[in-house]
Amino acid sequence: MAEFAPAELGAELQMSPYAAARLIGDALDLRHRLPRLWARVLTGEVKPWIGRKTADTTRCLSVEVAAAVDAKISPWAHSLSWGRLDAIVQAAVIEADPDGAATAAEAASRDQGVWLNPSNDHGIKDIHIRTEAPNAIWFDAAIDRIADDLARLGDDATKDVRRARAVGVLAQPQRALDLFTKAALTADPTPDKQPDSPPEGPAEPNETATRLALNTGTGVDPRPPATLYVHLNHDSITRDTTGVARFEGVGPITIDQARRFLSSCDVTIRPVIDLAGMPPVDSYEIPDRMREAVHLRNPVDVFPHATNTSRKRDLDHTESPTDTPTTADHPAKPGSTT
């Protein structure tokens, strides 16, 4: 490209030379590094911004890895949101260049930390945390548990305010343990140790509650109730160390990352669910087994152009209830739910 081509193009398109240079770079990358995606952009099947976003994401990759991404992403680039396409890109990178993916993961792990905003707003400060996904999930679960226990002990502030207060409790480990103990005793007191009167106002955990718990043999698990959903092939753990694990809410990760993330967890391995043989339900209430099956069959909201991948989303029908397929062993009644 000529040295001043971006400036000339920018003046013609009424954009800055920098923006014009990025446009030229994206077009060149699409044309020469992502030819399948480029062809679909030219025919109008894929939106140009999707092509540019892919080119920008794959710019630092080798030609071979970019070609693998091109093969993976081009068939779906017209119908998926960028968030879902980005997950496909990341998985393709891990599969095509496991060593490079491991190096990138190691570099990202060094870019962690906790920072306090230097400014104050009437005594309120912001905290920014960058850490590995399991740590963030456990931290959020611990904050939520403390906030709920504060409410159980009389704190009538909003949930957000209680979560903010929970940071101070969690910063003092013994105080957090005392809070867990006192909340457990308040929630389920034994008949012969019923408190004389209900707590008034937000209760402060203290040593008395802890000693009482120890004397009565009450055990309180300090671990927050958190679940890490990791989907992977059996061979990825037992044999293939270069496979891809999919971490719900995070995206594709390397097998080494999956091993490290799960190293301090109680791991439950579940086999693939027989979705076709799932018996129907003749009531509106959704049992856990069916909720899990629906999520595995449709991990993303089925509404057109929707992007929600949360397990808390509404479970809507993808077919008319009267046309629902059934099995020979579990015939469904007309209008039943699957």
Image (cartoon, grey):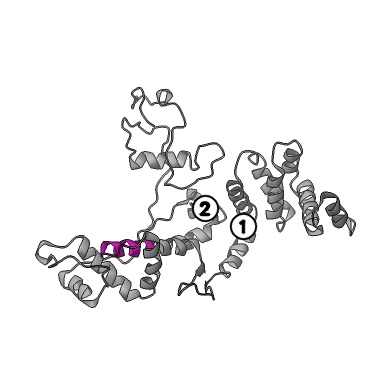
Q: Could you tell me which secondary element the residue under label 1 belongs to? A: helix
Q: From the image, which quarter does the C terminus lie in? A: top left
Closer to us: 35 or 239: 35
x and y, in percent, of residue 156 in the image: 30, 62
Region rendered in magenta: 143-156
Task: Name the residue type under label 2.
Answer: Ala
Residue found at x 79% / y 46%: 31
Task: Name the residue type under label 1.
Answer: Pro
Residue found at x 13% / y 65%: 194
Residue 152 sits inside the magenta stretch: yes
x and y, in percent, of residue 8 in the image: 88, 54
Q: Which of the two marks, 1 or 2, is nearer to us in this view?
A: 2
Real-space Cα distance between discs 1 and 2? 12 Å
Closer to us: 234 or 150: 150
**Can I make out residue 226 in this image?**
yes
Vertical relation: 327 (above or below) 134: above
For this view, does 126 lie left or right of residue 71? left
The circle drawn on residue 98 is 1
The circle drawn on residue 245 is 2
x and y, in percent, of residue 335 in the image: 36, 25
Residue 16 lies in what quarter of the image?
Answer: bottom right
For this view, does 337 lie left or right of residue 6? left
Vertical relation: 247 (above or below) 112: above
The local crowd at label 2, few if under 14, some if 14 to 19, many if 20 or more residues have their Cα within 10 Å, is many
x and y, in percent, of residue 11 in the image: 85, 53
Q: Could you tell me which secondary element the residue under label 2 belongs to? A: strand
